[in-house]
């Protein structure tokens, strides 16, 4: 399994997300089965950063910025602190666990529109796989 970066020296959000996924896959090699084709955009408008994840079997390509020429399956737009929260939220079936405080916090932010997820209805399994790839819990 490889995490590849589009930029020779990844910065900020791209380095953090790529490093987190790489570390999680090293600690939990069984998560490699989550690597099915998908394109996912993460953006934090408050910090003016975004990252695109192109996932293929055995490989994840991480690139900084939006790539309008590539249609993403899921786009998560949230304040930077909420993107970080997504990595530490307890999961149930790959989605925030409503029976635990952290899960309820994330779900409330989604309902209020603070965390916006495009593609949630059309690609729930992609969102679930992303959550499990990012999860440190």
Image: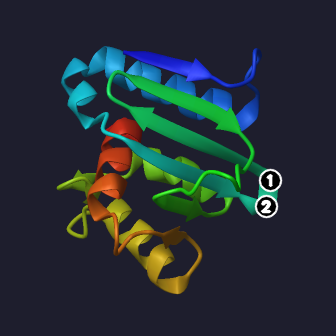
Spot occupied by residue 27 in the image (x, y as percentages of width and height): 30, 17
Q: Nearer the viewer, residue 35 or 116?
A: 35
In the image: residue 53, left or right of residue 30: right
Task: Looking at the picture, tell me which residue is in the foreground, 114 or 127.
Answer: 127
Q: Who's the residue at 33% across and 53% down the image?
A: 126
Which sits in the foreground, 99 or 3?
3
**Residue 136 image offset from top left, x and y in percent:** 37, 35
Q: Is residue 17 left or right of residue 63?
A: left
Looking at the picture, how far across and down is residue 43, in whole percent? Answer: 66, 55
What residue would you read off at disc 2?
Answer: 46
Quarter of the figure with residue 114: bottom right
- Could you say which is closer to the camera, residue 49 or residue 73? 73
**Residue 57 falls in which quadrant of the image?**
top left
Seen in the picture, residue 27 relative to 12 is either above or below; the reply is above
Relative image position of residue 52 (x, y in whole percent): 61, 43
Q: Which residue is mark 1?
A: 47
Where 23 falls versus 77 (above or below)? above
Residue 125 shown left or right of residue 88 in the figure: left
The residue under the point 39% across, 73% down is 107
Quadrant for the C terminus in the image: top left
In which image quadrant can residue 119 be found? bottom left
User: Label 2, label 1: how many angstroms apart (C-alpha)?
Assistant: 4 Å
Residue at the spot 50% in from the left edge and 75% down from the top edge = 109
In the image, residue 90 sits, relative to residue 105, either above or below, namely above
């Amino acid at each position: 399994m490889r995490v590849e970066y589009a930029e020779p020296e990844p910065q900020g959000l791209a380095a953090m997300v790529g490093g987190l996924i790489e570390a999680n896959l090293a600690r939990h090699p069984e998560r490699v089965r989550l690597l099915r084709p998908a394109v996912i955009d993460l953006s934090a408008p408050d910090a003016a950063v975004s990252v695109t994840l192109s996932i293929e079997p055995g490989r994840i390509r991480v690139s900084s910025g939006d790539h309008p020429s590539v249609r993403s399956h899921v786009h998560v737009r949230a304040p930077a602190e909420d993107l970080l929260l997504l990595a530490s939220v307890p999961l149930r079936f790959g989605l925030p666990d409503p029976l635990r405080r952290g899960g309820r916090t994330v779900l409330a932010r989604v309902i209020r529109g603070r965390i916006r997820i495009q593609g949630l209805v059309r690609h729930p399994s992609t969102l679930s796989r992303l959550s499990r790839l990012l999860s440190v819990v």
